[in-house]
Amino acid sequence: MSKAANPVPICAEAIDVRRWLGYWLDEIDAAESSRLEAHMFECAACAHALERLVALGSSIRELHKRGQLATIVPAAFVDTLKNAGLSVREYRLRPEDSVLCTVTPRDDFVVGHLEAPLEGVTRLDAIIEQLEDGSVVRLEDIPFNRREREIVLVPSIHELRPVETLTMRVQVVALDDGGERVLGTYTFNHRATRD
Amino acid sequence: MTGSSYALRVSYDSFGSSEDGPPSEEALLARRVMIAAPARDVSAEAALYRALAPRVRLYGLKHLRDAQAAADLVQDVLLMTLDRLRQGEVREPERIASFVLGACRQSVIDLRRGRQRRQHLLDVYAEDLPLADAAPAPALDAERLQQCLQRLPERERTVLVMTFFDDSDADEIARATGITAGNARVVRHRGIERLRRCLEGRVHGV
């Protein structure tokens, strides 16, 4: 028995990743779940495919928990982080507000709540400008929940920790058939914590 | 699970005559374990353990949502399976995968009822098995994954992070983000496909 030539067997009835995800997240009914489970036990190739999917999810979770991903999340997700026992430093800004902010060794995440009038908005972009070096990034079609009336920025705390001084200006822009409309500009003045 | 629920008599005649085709690698290993008894074919036992451990681990992660509990399940189920094979108590060893799935289901029910019975088998057999490398999870290049995630469209990255942070389903994502569950599934699938292509180096402009 040589495994080196073909370590992962081929499956005659390969299961699509969408179905494996549905199985993993309990989105399918019990009968389909049992069928997929039985197939997974009989089929090394499909077990391997599911294992890769689970490993991908686990790695995303770890990167996020280590603060290595910058994301924009719904406000409800901040509660999920806190309920998981993670320490979240929060800053709330209204349009045109400016805030002094920092990161301490105890923080797992730092988030910026940007209040904005989102009624009737169908698409949002965020233009992020770093004043020290003049760099500008435009994040297109960012996720938002109209009911929450805010956008929540979660920068990578991993990248933020070693930074001494940073001034970041965020402009939130609504886009529709009539063009662009600035909903607010928010300024973060980051200074490293001295312990 | 009661012990008798897996006390199935071995039928050696059934080997090699499966209507589903030739016996699988796992079935051949199971047979080797059985015919070696009362002696031990340690290499067959280890190979069978390595082949089935990832599937049991996945089952445990899915149903117990805890890595340590899943690792315990791997030991419980596979030590019991090997014990049954040695005792000649597996009636259809060519269906060993199905037997193990049944054992997983019953063990999870047992765990949920708070019954524990793993210590005896661990005491007797654990030292002989290569448990440390039994179920290695596939390794991912974290740095590459981070780069690929940061190159995803914002919406896809958000949905993937929310999905995998605590295994949220599409309905939960939809409620939190204000989109439909169907849209959440589409965004999620697009994100995974884009990530996979990026990780495989097939797409540069993600």
Image (spheres, coloured by chain):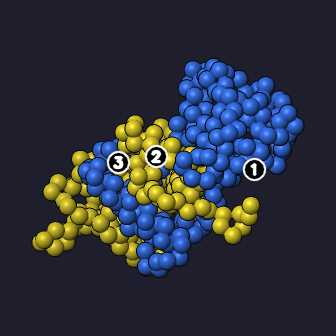
Q: Amino acid at mark 1?
A: Ala
- Percent across and percent down for residue B116 are 68, 23
The colour assigned to chain B within the rendered structure:
blue
Residues A168 and B3: in front is B3
Helix, strand, or loop for circle 1? helix
Q: Does residue A183 appear in this view?
A: yes
Q: Residue visible at 56% across and 58% down? A: A45
Label located before the other in sequence (1 or 3) = 1
Q: Residue visible at 44% across and 62% down? A: B192
Q: Amino acid at mark 2?
A: Leu
Is residue A106 found left or right of A122 in the rendered image? right
Q: Does residue A94 appear in this view?
A: no
Q: Chain of mark 2?
A: A
Q: Which residue is mark 3?
A: B170
Q: Chain of mark 1?
A: B
- Which callout, 2 or 3, points to the residue nearer the camera? 2
Q: Residue visible at 47% across and 37% down? A: A83
Helix, strand, or loop for circle 2? helix
Label ID, residue B47 = 1
Q: Which residue is mark 2?
A: A36
